[in-house]
Image (cartoon, grey):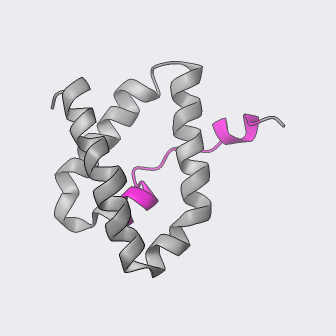
Amino acid sequence: MSLDFLSQQPYTPVCLMTSMVLGTQYVGELDYMRRFRDEVMLEAGALGRLAVDFYYLLSRYTSALVAENKLLRKLLLNTVFKPALRLLEFIYPK
């Protein structure tokens, strides 16, 4: 199965899943993650682009579930997004 259709999708400034999980209290971190996406991942060639495409594909199908479930948002915040931010700050200082 070809994933070429994913590269045709424009990247929007809003990361739906991340925005839902982080919420408004993490606006600075969200901008930081977007900058990493734009300056590092999308410039890293095919592998970086594939990782971003996979995130957008995954969030397209799971965002409704996350939006409806406060417990799931909290779980994702503490087990995925906060650790990812700490790792990101280590490898890509602000």
Left or right? Give the position of 66 relative to 62: left
34 shown above or below 93: below
Classify 20 as above or below 49.
Answer: below
Residue farthest along the right direction in this orientation = 1
Where is residue 15 shown, x and y percent of the image? 42, 54
Q: Residue at x 59, y 21 (%)?
A: 46
On screen, residue 3 versus residue 19, left or right, reads right
Residue at 17% from the left image edge and 65% from the top image edge: 25
Name the one closer to the observer, 81 or 23.
Answer: 81
Where residue 43 sits: x, y (%)? 45, 21
The image quadrant where one finds the C terminus is: top left
Q: Quadrant of the N terminus?
A: top right
Examine the image and state in which quarter residue 69 appears: bottom left
How many numbered callouts? 0
Q: Quadrant of residue 64?
A: bottom right
Inspect the magenta stretch and tell me whether residue 9 lies in it.
Answer: yes
Asked whether residue 84 is drawn in magenta, I would say no
> Is residue 89 depicted above or below 55 in this figure?
above
Magenta segment boundaries in residue numbering: 3-20
- Judging depth in this view, the residue of 9 and 85 nearest the camera is 85
Q: Position of residue 53 (x, y in %)?
A: 58, 40
Q: Going by the picture, which residue comes out furthest to the top?
A: 45
Residue 49, percent across and down? 55, 30
At 37% from the left and 76% from the top, the residue drawn is: 71
> Is residue 54 visible in the rendered structure shown here?
yes
Residue 10 in view, yes or no: no
